[in-house]
Amino acid sequence: MPTPPMEAPPAIELLGIDKSFGTVRAVKGVSLRIESGTITGIVGENGAGKSTLMSILYGLYHADAGEICIDGKTVRIEGPRDAIARGIGMVHQHFMLIDSFTVLENLVLGAEGGPLLAKGMAAARAELARLGRDYDLNVDPDRLVADLSVGEQQRVEILKVLFRGARILILDEPSAVLTPQETDRLFRILATLKERGVTIVLITHKLREIMAATDRVYVMRRGEIVAERRTTDTDPEALAELMVGRKVRLDLDKAEAHLGEVRLKVEHLSLVDSRGVRLLDDIGLELRAGEIVGIAGVTGNGQTELLQVLAGIRAPTGGSFSVCGRTVDRAHSCDPAEMRELGVAHVPEDRLRQGMVAAFRASETSILGHHHEPPFSRNYIMSNPEVSAHCAQLMELFDVRPRLPGLRSDSFSGGNQQKLVLAREMAHEPKVLLVGQPTRGVDIGAIEFIHRELVKSRDAGCAVLVVSVELDEILSLADRILVMFAGRIVGEVEQRRADERTLGLMMAGAGAG
Amino acid sequence: MDDALSLVFVMLAATLRVATPLVLCAMAGLFSERSGIIDVGLEGKMLMAAFFAATTAAVTGSAWLGVGAAIVAAEVLALLHGFACITHRGNQVVSGVALNILAAGLTVVLGAAWFARGGQTPSLVGEQRLMPLFFSKAGDNILVYVALASVPLTWWIVSRTRFGLRLRAVGEMPLAVEAAGISVAWLRYRAVLLCGLLTGLAGAYIAIAQNAGFSRDMTAGQGFIALAAIIFGKWRPVPAFGACLVFGLLDAIAIRLQGVRLPGLGEVPVQLIQALPYLLTIFLLAGFIGRAVAPKAAGIPYEKER
């Protein structure tokens, strides 16, 4: 007698998962079901609880309540060890790789195959070669991880998961650090894995990737699953609306730029650090009043250093730049306070460490750099009422929530922190505005707002330089796009002639040609 | 010719004698620091171990029981350090300094209470001490050989074993170790315990092999010199061993030069010579050794849930 066809149990089933950090309920009674051999996307804004949920599945956090079923069986996952034993592997947003180790050493960590390394390492080397052939994931086993590109490091992470025999692969924001080409390659790898029966969970906030790679998508908002869709039945606008909970406009209305005088002129600028590494190499650029120039590039190609030099945080070791009539070079350096006096405002990339003092009240953050000026300070004495009033006004203007000038700066969400920093920098009507990663860790609603403010500032005649690793952001904001690679500017494109493919090739160092 | 040879032999033996506690201590600190736990308490552990070694040897008459007691004493302090820094994520430097102060005070108080000799233990003789094995003049007791063996052994453990791989990993990036399904705390406790074992041997050596009894503060900063040796050696066993030998040689020269009139200079002040190892430490640490890259996670308490 033929056995009746049985429906395969789902690879993962979560039932009523709940998790709080202190008083914040990060995940609220989430249930979801992920079918075996599919690619499922979990999409949501920063802080929606996606990563927390997956960290629970991987055993890094413990759920306060709820049940986890793997292949139809209820399991207890006390730690990553249990998760690995159940065939779950995770590629974290911040790679869990040890820079000073070789690829092979990273691969075997936790699966060494005995108390002595020699035997296990030899076996792992053979296995690595096999995996590399099977999945087109070739990486030299003897190279140091520190010397690998980010894309290669990610491949090592995936290899690590496969090496442990995982059948369920969780990827947390895998494309955050990749060029578009590397992202495409990643998705090809994922497709191969899916063919071989691996179940894949993709956590991302990039809707385009959800559309490109997944079979099914769950949308999370404020710790809850608010929707489940088949990818073919939905579109980015609908998903964005579900994520934010209201209609969102993904495109940005922008009038033609009215170019004014040159406010910032950079010539042959270079920066060599104390170890002799050339961080900036012969940079030249011009920034005019009334335009937004965007600098695209993969993290770590000198954008951070360029902003630091232009903001006066580091002195150039060669070349010069002139800003609002003042020339800065090796012999005539300029500190950030002088830069501010000249009318240069700076929204740093690392908001929490350079943009604000985490432990300060919002009101104090709102005057940093201007704290010595009246009316905030007279005769070396701070006037708290004035500071609070100023902060309250900025919060109103930039819609910072909650509107509490007395709250610690790091108690605000990423988006609200950024709005506060931006409000501070824009409050003094700068002539030049330097912005690093304007929307890193910022929710969609605030992204819209910040982009509009930057464009407003441009239209008011400010010269704006935006550095971002989010290519979409550069494409929609900038009037002119420069691409940085290995400390050099390798290409320049007008916005209307820019497309993702050519920019991506430049970002990977394939040259402007 | 014979004179020169015997001088070389004497200097070599003296260097090894002086370097032995440094080597043991440096290997001890290396295990701890490679796991990400900074240990400025090497000195305190060694002092405590020296005291209990001398006390036990004096009371029981057995040098070997002295060594055992030294190890137990050092392990107790090591576990305290682990409890403060690993379990309770305390500040590692503060905990280490506290242990040093505790050891400096406790040894004197207990010594005064038990033996009433102003903090000293009775002089040890015969079976109460570890005696030279092969060359009576060289002072080559068993712990000198243990110290010599500890260097290749440490190298082998750190670079060739599973434990070593995990140890190096946890000192660089504990989160990656956790994510690989390995317990960060247990790894670090094992490293700290190894550190206790080796500092215990170092302390025993000072009290019952190199000297014949305990006197207050007898470790005289050697724990810190060992710490410096670890840094010169860039947290690698063999170079750290080399640094210990340099310190040992300096010390041996210092002892030899005392009271000697050098041509053109006259009698070299004893104080200057004794200060030589410390001066060298400052000079070298001030940047003559190039960039020393410490284990990345050293000194940072590991917290999983933010």
Image (tube, coloured by chain):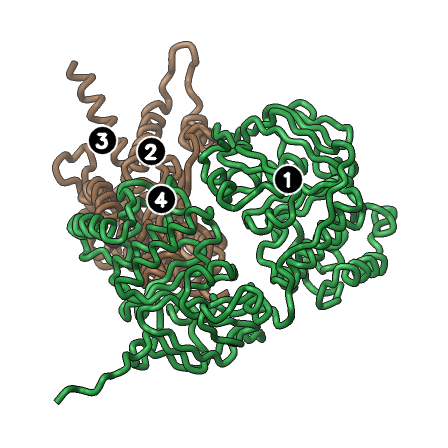
Chain colours: A green, B brown
**Left or right of A382, for residue B135:** left
Q: Nearer the viewer, mark 2 or mark 3?
A: 2
Residue closest to the eye, B90 or A437: A437
Label 4 sits on residue: A145
Q: Do residues under tags 4 and 2 come within 8 Å of each other at their CB atoms?
A: no
Q: Label 1, label 4: how many angstroms apart (C-alpha)?
A: 35 Å
The numbered disc on residue B243 is 2
Earlier-in-chain disc, 2 versus 3? 3
| Element type at mark 3 | helix
Q: Position of residue A333 (x, y in %)?
A: 68, 28
- Give the amino acid type for the residue marked by disc 1 in the picture: Arg
* Residue behind mark 1: A480
Q: CA distance from mark 2 to mark 3?
A: 17 Å
Name the subunit of mark 1: A
Would residue A376 appear left or right of A398 to someone viewing this image? right
In this image, B1 relative to B199: left or right?
A: left
- Same-chain check, marks 4 and 3: no
